[in-house]
Amino acid sequence: MTPVPRWNPSSIATRREQMLLARLGNHRKLFAFLYKHRLELFDDAFQDELAAMYRDTGEGRLPVPPALLAMVLLLQAYHGVSDREAVELTVVDLRWQLVLGILGAETQAFGQSTLQAFRDRMSAHGMDLRLLERSIELAKKTQEFDWKKLPKTLRLAIDSRPLEGAGRVEDTINLLGHAAFKLLRGAAVLLELKAEEIAACAGAPAFLAPSIKTGLDIDWFDPEQKADAIVELTRQIDALEAWIRRQAGDAADEAPLKELFECIAQLRAQDLQPDPPGGGKPHIRKGVAKDRRVSIEDPQMRHGRKSKSKRFKGYKQHIANDLDTELILAASVTPANRPEGEGAAALAEDLSRSPRNEKIAEVYIDRAYVGSELVRGAAAAGAQILCKPRTAANGERFSKDDFKKNFKLRTITCPAGQTQRFVPGQTVEFEPGICGACSLRSRCTNASNDAGRTVHIAADEQQQQRFRKLVSTTKGREALRQRVHVEHRLAHLSRKQGPRARYRGLRKNLFDLRRHCAVLNLETIQRWGGGLSMRKAA
């Protein structure tokens, strides 16, 4: 059996390499850093791990060293280029050749398909996480970081950013038309028929048009015609599905037709409902269904909201940043509609195996992460949680903060002295009769005279009160400002990766995030030092 080839570039700089290193100067200094540390980043042990990806079946071995391809993936993220451009740059860019140890090469060392297959293999074996971990391990080994002087506890900051999905987002009509078109094409391949023949036999000609709205050919601004078009669209989909099931037989319950049928069923369930309920004509559902699919090409994209005014469709990226080293220790990706707690759970899993896994002393978060298992676990272990509290505004009237709360007795007392018991997560209503006669009523509530003041007690109210005490002091506000560092990390990530995903699907975008975080870590190490001290060729 042929062994997996090693990447073993020389550690002695030739005169030409020395000249190129000198010309790099202050621009794109990471090339020089990677040249210096490439065999530390991809040491023998890590190259063994990469080689092990090819030993599961004894098949699929490459004539290209896996470590070289892994370095190409880092350079690709650093430069922000496509697979085709990455392959081309290995031939035309001397800086790439310098780092890869192929200076002077006139032909490409591998093809685009080789790079794509290697990326998929790394994802399948979780080696993107190892690449991120290796960047942290490199920080521990290099002189750029004096690791021994770092605190023995961890100050962790967590935050997220929106990532627009790469899949095309469509409205209900186009989603259904697109899904039916894919079913038509899939059946044509399986049955070895032309799509035109199937559409004619099934009575579904609309799916042969350049777009479904062209195929239905109505005035889409006319509500009545639009309603009739939805009925006709579902009729043609029903006819197409029935014809294909009859002709395909058992193959209709196997891939790829099975997934295509399921896609149409999912879209109909989420976007259509009968009018009247129980058997009327189908019409577009009012409001947005829970976990609504928004793209045919990327089934994992979802609607998301970063704030009240900012909406997006795609994913959320989450990172955990070490405030003392500026290194990103963990990264995760979730569909845009999922709560931050899910992203934090994945971060916690990766943090448990991070090379910097010291006990967490402080966690800096925004409010969305307060209820996550990561934060609760850190707090239970003695960590201080630092977060801006929810505001308790009530105009010019008394806010929730003006009420005294006793969490041991679970009582709340208003400014006038009336006391009520509370249950976390529920709303307290004060006695209407007492509130109605209270001299402070005008400063407390504008409710009708037969109603008392109400105060909602959040499930995490006690923790929110701690946060409010924190921001009430100069020292506390100064501590909270430390979270800006993780925001800077996300800003750097956004500049490198852009606002839009390069890939479709959760796993591929997680791979892309982890390798970008590894690049940011390498830049951080380089920024802390990065001087070159290479042995020179005679």
Image (cartoon, rainbow, N blue to C red):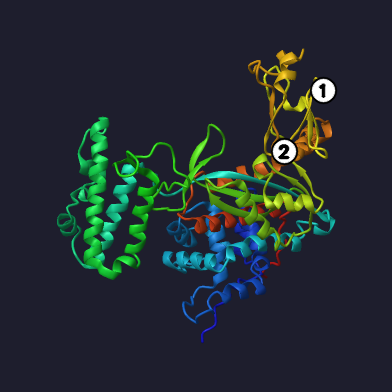
For the residue pair 107 and 274, the one nearer the viewer reads as 274
Direction from residue 152 to residue 69 in the image, left or right: left
Secondary structure beneath dot 2 equals loop
Q: Which residue occupies 49% across, 49% down?
A: 501
Direction from residue 292 to residue 122 in the image, left or right: right
Residue 332 can be seen, yes or no:
yes
Dot 2 amino acid type? Val
Q: Quadrant of the C terminus?
A: bottom right
Residue 212, how many percent across, how many down?
25, 45
Residue occupying the far front of the picture: 433
Tell me, for residue 124, which label it has, or none: none
Dots 1 and 2: beta carbons under 8 Å? no
Q: Which residue occupies 58% across, 44% down?
A: 161
Graded by Cα atoms within 10 Å as few (under 14), some (14 to 19) or many (20 or more), the crowding at tag 1 reads few
Secondary structure beneath dot 1 equals loop
Q: Which quadrant holds residue 273?
A: top left
For the residue pair 199 and 493, the one nearer the viewer reads as 199
Q: Which residue occupies 44% across, 40% down?
A: 288
Pick whichever of labels 1 and 2 is earlier in the sequence: 1
Dot 1 amino acid type? Gly
Q: What residue sits right under mark 2 in the picture?
A: 423
Q: Which residue occupies 21% across, 66% down?
A: 247
Direction from residue 351 to residue 478 in the image, left or right: right
Q: CA distance from mark 1 to mark 2?
A: 19 Å
- Tell me if residue 176 comes above or below residue 429 in the rendering: below
Graded by Cα atoms within 10 Å as few (under 14), some (14 to 19) or many (20 or more), the crowding at tag 2 reads some
Residue 358, how many percent across, how many down?
78, 58
Q: What residue sits right under mark 1 in the picture?
A: 417
For the residue pair 248 and 360, the one nearer the viewer reads as 248
For the residue pair 136 and 88, the one nearer the viewer reads as 136
